Amino acid sequence: MSHTCKIRLGELNDAPAIAQVHVASWRSAYRPLFPESVLAALSIADLEAKWKESIVAGTSRVFVAEADGAVIGFLEFGPSRDDDAPTGTYEILALYVDPNFWCRGSGRALCRGCISAAAALGANTLSLWTLVDNGAARRFYRTVGFSEQSGVKRPYVRGGVSLEQVRYVRTIAR
């Protein structure tokens, strides 16, 4: 079931809600991949400070999805951090939606907003990294036009768990 959400640039006062969505989404999406101790250790206060810092720094852009005045998701993007990225490549650094709103269109709406904003900045390509074992995220990214970049992987270690990430890319038509 789809719902109406508004996409806008995140503001400093959104940081607490962004942090809450971040933790809730991590705890739901990654429960099969990480031990409960790792998920329980996620700190809304620490993430709130991180998101305040990110919004103030302005080196990346943070969009929020809002429904009925509440932040239900967010997306952060900026210039690609990958050494091998061609000029004009931007990267989705984070995309999380409150689990109560999964599969209702807010993730797609955030991606559309990001693609438009990246195109306006002159981007040719948008990339992102996702866990190989996160099938739901991988399916989602394919539905919004991303393709796995064959053979491009990197390790991801957190809380003593070693996983692997794969890079997805999407050409931005202008």
Image (cartoon, rainbow, N blue to C red):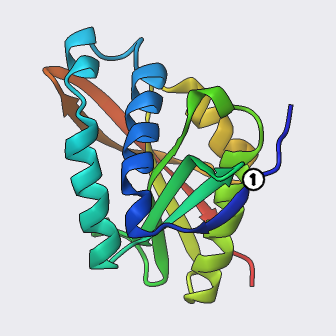
Asked whether 138 or 17 is in front, the reply is 17
Q: Which of the 4 image quarters holds residue 112?
A: bottom right
Question: Which residue occupies the extreme right position in the image?
Answer: 1
Asked whether 78 or 164 is in front, the reply is 78
Q: Give the residue drawn at x 37%, y 33%.
A: 23
Question: Quick check: can you spot residue 93?
Answer: yes
Q: Give the residue drawn at x 60%, y 48%.
A: 70
* Residue 97 vertical position relative to residue 83 in the rendered view, above or below: above
Asked whether 20 or 150 is in front, the reply is 20
Q: Residue 126: give x, y in percent of width and height.
A: 55, 67
Pointer 1: residues within 10 angstroms few (<14), some, or many (20+)?
many
Question: Quick check: can you spot residue 81?
Answer: no
Does residue 138 appear to the left or right of 29 in the view shown?
A: right
Does residue 14 appear to the left or right of 161 in the view shown?
A: right
Q: Amino acid at mark 1?
A: Cys
Q: How many marks?
A: 1
Q: Identify the image quadrant of the N terminus.
A: top right
Q: Residue 101: give x, y in percent of width and height.
A: 67, 33
Does residue 74 appear to the left or right of 30 in the view shown?
A: right
Q: Which of the 4 image quarters holds residue 43?
A: top left
SS under mark 1 = loop
Q: Give the residue drawn at x 63%, y 44%.
A: 141
The residue carrying mark 1 is: 5
Q: Give the residue drawn at x 56%, y 82%.
A: 123
* Residue 102 vertical position relative to residue 54 in the rendered view, above or below: above
Q: Residue 22: give x, y in percent of width and height.
A: 41, 40
Q: Residue 82: give x, y in percent of width and height.
A: 31, 65
Q: Identify the image quadrant of the C terminus.
A: bottom right
